[in-house]
Image (cartoon, rainbow, N blue to C red):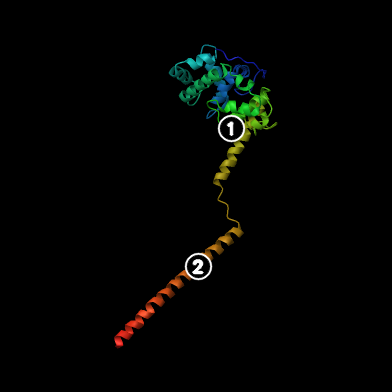
Amino acid sequence: MASPSRRKGPRSLALAGDEVADTLLAQDPLALLIGMVLDQQIPLERAFKSPADLKERLGGTLDVGAVASMDPDELAALFSVRPALHRFPGSMARRVQELCHVVIDTYGGDAAAIWTSAQDGAQLLANVKALPGFGEQKARIFVALLGKQFAVRPPGWQEASSPFGEPGSFRSVADIDSREALGKVRQYKQQLKAEAKATAKAPPKAAPSSKVKAISKTKAKVKAVSKTKVKVKAASKARVTAPTKATAKASGNG
């Protein structure tokens, strides 16, 4: 069961850095989904080239039904052939197979129906988030990719893909349409990492002087209260023991 493509898109993308692989991503919705699933913990070029490599290893056809019905161990073995399709070939093979099952069971084998059936951005985001391997951020990035490069723009798609759907930004794969754009996205991610690293190393902020004074006053009050309690306790003890001593003296004189 092939995954039909029923939407206009770019003739090719610039995600894999390979003409054949990028053309496949642009023309085959299932390939695009698989590439997005694999885009974690490995270079993005490798992730988005892997669908073309998988197609070749499957005999030249990337068929959603064939992948879904394969023996899981056989599919994992195909993922593991060097060069492996992912850093974690076994777990990613299972995830891709789960994705294919969802495409068949929910969308009748038509991967593109995940977005062509969405009436608005909220529904599109919900459809994508329900797929195996798509968390909140990845789902938003994918919705942005569909809107920016495939003209899939149901009402509210930019809000659903925020902040990745913002025009002119270079935050994610949604913005990569050239080698230059790839460089800008990498630069943005490096900047985020540097900022996160700097924040982690920064010493804790000192409390505002007003807050320090308030804390000092509170401590002083607590200390004063403690001293008062000690004095009260001592006075109470004196009142109790004083009559006892007087009584003892009187008894002695008698």
- At x 50% / y 17%, what residue is drawn? 68
Residue occupied by mark 1:
137
69 shown above or below 220: above
Query: Dot 2: few (<14), some (14–19), or many (≥20) neighbours within 10 Å?
Result: few
Query: Dot 1: few (<14), some (14–19), or many (≥20) neighbours within 10 Å?
Result: some
- At x 61% / y 19%, what residue is drawn? 113
Judge left or right: residue 44 versus residue 241.
Answer: right
From this viewpoint, which residue is outermost toward the bottom?
253
Q: Would you identify the image quadrant in which residue 38 lies?
A: top right
What type is the residue that disc 2 sits on? Val
Instruction: Determine if residue 93 is in view.
Output: yes
- Figure quadrant of the N terminus: top right
- The label on residue 225 is 2
Q: CA distance from mark 1 to mark 2?
A: 54 Å
Instruction: Determine if residue 173 is in view.
Output: no
- The label on residue 46 is none
Residue 126 screen position, x and y as percent: 59, 28
- Decide which of 106, 63 is in the foreground and name it: 106
Judge left or right: residue 115 versus residue 66.
Answer: right
What type is the residue that disc 1 sits on? Gln
